[in-house]
Amino acid sequence: MPDFKNDQYGTCTLTVERACPIELAMHVVGSKWKGIILYLLSHSPMYYNAMRREIPGITQRILTLQLRNLEVDGIIERKETNDNPKKVLYYLTALGEDFVPVLKSIKSWGNAYMSKQ
Amino acid sequence: MPDFKNDQYGTCTLTVERACPIELAMHVVGSKWKGIILYLLSHSPMYYNAMRREIPGITQRILTLQLRNLEVDGIIERKETNDNPKKVLYYLTALGEDFVPVLKSIKSWGNAYMSKQ
DNA sequence: CAGGATCCCAAGGGATACTG
DNA sequence: CAGTATCCCTTGGGATCCTG
């Protein structure tokens, strides 16, 4: 888990709220790829390469990086199998599952947005 | 309005969906400050400097930049008064209003996240 | 009051090659 | 299969000063 006492979120100065749940949420999930990754995992746990195939534009480095970030932030977990070659399964934590409804509302708004262009 | 035919969202290659409403939504609102800005505007229209005061960490350049982006993307609108010196009022469009429930769910998840640290 | 202009920096992201 | 290792580049964001 990250140490929020020692980063920007520990000393958030926004006056409308005593803290910044929105900025915090944006920090955790608001990158180019995290939304898609979480959307995939909201349907079922997935192995690394399966995820890669479902997100054609992403590179291995970036996918691994984003997965690590989500893991550190407690949104997902990874589990290695004993197979050879080994496989790594990624899945949502309880916190990650809690985010699924948020993701759904983001998705439906995105769809409405696209239809209005 | 941006020309989505000529950017990445026009040729999105994600296979799970024919298009990427989530990536699109993240693109539109997923920056460090946009969430806060929209949250403020969800309560009431605001003048430029009032917004600045409510978001202490932001610089003028960045605030203006984010407001311009949101305006181009059709999420907010700006209206100048005839006062001297002039004032500029920012407020949500219908599309922006549609995003408010999304923002609320993001906020409540963020609060839950913070309480679990 | 609501910005524009300039300069600068760090982070996120991308391309490619390699490996236990 | 699931990553590392390098190298590079663009973008978001920040600091400071100036203005109609």
Image (cartoon, coloured by chain):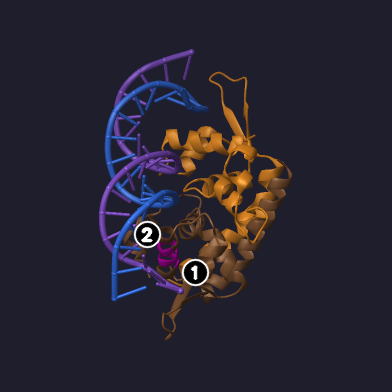
Chain colours: A brown, B orange, C blue, D purple
Amino acid carrying label 1: it is Asn
Asked if marks 1 and 2 touch (Cβ < 8 Å), the reply is no
Q: Could you say where residue B10 lies in the image, as x and y percent from the top left?
A: 63, 44
Mark 2, chain letter?
Answer: A
Q: Could you say where residue B56 lies in the image, as x and y percent from the top left?
A: 42, 43
Q: Could you say where residue A48 lies in the image, as x and y percent from the top left?
A: 48, 70
Can residue A99 be spotted in the picture?
no
Q: Which of the labelled discs sits on residue A10, or is there none?
A: 2
Q: Are marks 1 and 2 on the same chain?
A: yes
Compared to B106, does B52 lie above or below? above
Can residue B70 be spotted in the picture?
yes
What's the residue at 53%, 76% (across, down)? Answer: A94
Q: Which of the labelled discs sits on residue A106, or is there none?
A: none
Residue at which label 1 appears: A49
| Magenta stretch bounds | A64-70
Does dot 1 land on a helix, a strand or a loop? helix
